[in-house]
């Protein structure tokens, strides 16, 4: 797994600044007020900081943006940088500042002179998240580990404690990004399951259900998706038992390691992106890693259906009728609408076996959600207002875009089948909604449920504020926050790692 950069928090030592080799950054407020750290840099650079603060370039900066002073005279550092940020920044601005520093520093060591900045750990987290680099398949010189980050701050001990949880979340995000970025000839169904088994090292209980057992359980819709592939279909069950004797939160992920569309084959252009069609399962894996790494006092079970959708003489055909684990029959109109066939069996199994307090499924499910929401927000569908509001609050607190979408019986008519209980698609109108309506049929009446369509946010070609191009790790931090806020044992929670305010 790609390892996040090491972050060290320390008491401010201005005498050490001159000799630091790498990038040195300090903060200046929007009104140009310089603290002791900026004044020391100004002295070392013979007034360069003061001139920069008084310049139009600094005035034009938005909160969280960075001004590069270049090669500073009087210092060993290769670069000195000014960050425009108020002392009590909103989390979004602090993360943005950290991300800007990550871009500036590249592979160099970074010293952040945070002074009296409130929650400097947010800046550190932004630096670490944006500093991710998936380089496993690049040849050439040995790729060094990410250079360290040192944060000198007045409240460094508190920041160090708070960052411990953020570090766990960063590890989870990196695991998700690695899985989603991995090419499918490497991340086969077998390899995916093997990587999830490594979570046992953190105390997660992991089971791998093979095809023979899935057949006995009646997971025929899931097995039908993978029957055209040489790679065996699997379901992996991951249990984190960190709470008291309480029903778990169930997270269910779609894990299609590659999606050709099957017999309803996709166009060739852009098909290479379908290595990311296991993004839902990748997110579940990242959340389970995060919870275990920070020893969350909660019970959470993650279940992922891992398959490959390929065209073959054995592949399911349009017009086939398959029976789900629940017992309902499905007419397969389009074999490229395979994710819901995987999810419905795993969701039913999760409810039958674990009787969860709530269930959340994640999937790169529809292109329609990308048309509707672009790459800024995941689509959120829910049968429970309280659960939905809690998740939306967690997503906002972590700066991960999410937008609630409607459900309604009126959409069910699009799923009516002449020969079976339902069709697997409802046509182009409201495509993401009818997909959610399909899944809702496999949710028991008393189970609070959310469906997250992450097709637009799991992987982004141009990158995001906190991630380079490719996999984003969207959802790991939001779901970790949801667990922290709503499912952990009261009065014994680990320290809060996220600010409730991301605006401003």
Image (spheres, grey):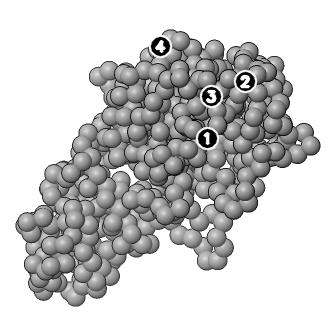
Mark 4 neighbour class, 10 Å CA radius: few under 14, some 14 to 19, many 20 or more? few
Quick one: SS at disc 1? loop
Q: To which residue does mark 1 refer?
A: 428
Label whose residue precedes the other's in the sequence (4 or 3): 4
Quick one: SS at disc 2? loop
Q: Do we see residue 115 in this rendering? A: yes
Q: CA distance from mark 1 to mark 3?
A: 10 Å
Q: Residue at x 66, y 20 (%)?
A: 349
State whether residue 347 is above or below residue 467: above
Q: Is residue 67 left or right of residue 313?
A: left
Mark 1 neighbour class, 10 Å CA radius: few under 14, some 14 to 19, many 20 or more? few
Q: Are marks 4 and 1 in contact (CB under 8 Å)?
A: no
Q: Are marks 2 and 3 in contact (CB under 8 Å)?
A: no
| Residue 417 marker | 2
Q: To which residue does mark 3 refer?
A: 414
Label whose residue precedes the other's in the sequence (1 or 3): 3
Q: CA distance from mark 4 to mark 3?
A: 42 Å
Q: To which residue does mark 4 refer?
A: 245
Q: Is residue 47 left or right of residue 328?
A: left
């Amino acid at each position: 797994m790609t390892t996040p950069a090491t972050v060290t928090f320390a008491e401010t030592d201005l005498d050490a600044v001159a000799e630091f080799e790498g990038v040195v950054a300090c903060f200046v407020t929007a009104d140009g007020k310089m603290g002791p750290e900026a004044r020391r840099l100004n002295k070392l650079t013979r007034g360069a900081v003061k001139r920069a603060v008084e310049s139009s370039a600094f005035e034009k900066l938005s909160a969280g943006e960075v001004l590069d002073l270049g090669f500073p005279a009087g210092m060993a550092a290769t670069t000195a940088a000014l960050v425009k940020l108020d002392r009590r920044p909103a989390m979004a601005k602090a993360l943005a500042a950290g991300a800007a520093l990550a871009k500036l520093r590249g592979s160099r060591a970074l010293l952040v002179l945070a002074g009296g900045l409130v929650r400097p750990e947010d800046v550190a987290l932004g630096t670490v998240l944006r500093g991710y680099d998936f380089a496993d398949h690049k040849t050439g010189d040995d790729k060094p580990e990410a250079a360290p980050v040192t944060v000198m701050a007045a409240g460094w001990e508190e920041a160090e404690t708070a960052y411990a949880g953020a570090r766990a979340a960063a590890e989870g995000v990196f695991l998700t990004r690695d899985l989603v970025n991995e090419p499918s000839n490497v991340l086969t169904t077998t390899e995916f399951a093997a990587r999830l088994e490594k979570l046992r090292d953190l105390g997660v209980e992991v089971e791998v259900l093979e095809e023979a057992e899935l057949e006995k359980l009646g997971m025929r819709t899931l097995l039908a998706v993978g029957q055209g592939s040489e790679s065996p279909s699997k379901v992996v069950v991951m249990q984190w038992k960190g709470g008291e004797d309480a029903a778990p939160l169930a997270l269910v992920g779609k894990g299609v390691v590659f999606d050709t569309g099957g017999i309803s084959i996709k166009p060739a252009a852009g098909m290479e992106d379908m290595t990311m069609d296991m993004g839902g399962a990748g997110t579940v894996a990242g959340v389970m890693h995060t919870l275990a790494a920070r020893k969350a006092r909660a019970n959470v079970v993650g279940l992922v259906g891992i398959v490959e959708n390929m065209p073959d003489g054995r592949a399911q055909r349009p017009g086939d009728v398959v029976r789900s684990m629940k017992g309902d029959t499905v007419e397969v109109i389009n074999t490229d609408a395979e994710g819901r066939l995987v999810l419905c069996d795993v969701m039913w199994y999760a409810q039958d076996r674990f009787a969860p307090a709530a269930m959340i499924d994640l999937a790169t499910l529809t292109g329609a959600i990308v048309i509707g929401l672009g790459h800024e927000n995941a689509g959120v569908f829910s049968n429970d207002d309280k659960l939905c509001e809690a998740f939306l609050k967690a997503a906002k607190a972590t700066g991960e875009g999410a937008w609630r979408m409607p459900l309604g019986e009126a959409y069910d008519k699009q799923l009516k089948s002449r020969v079976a209980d339902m069709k697997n698609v409802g046509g182009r109108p409201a495509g993401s909604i009818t997909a959610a309506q399909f899944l809702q049929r496999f949710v028991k009446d008393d189970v609070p449920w959310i469906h997250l369509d992450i097709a637009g946010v799991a992987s982004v070609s141009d990158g995001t504020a906190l991630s380079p191009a490719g996999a984003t790790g969207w959802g790991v931090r939001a779901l970790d926050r949801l667990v922290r806020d709503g499912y952990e044992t009261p009065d014994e929670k680990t320290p809060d790692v996220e600010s409730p305010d991301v605006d401003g």
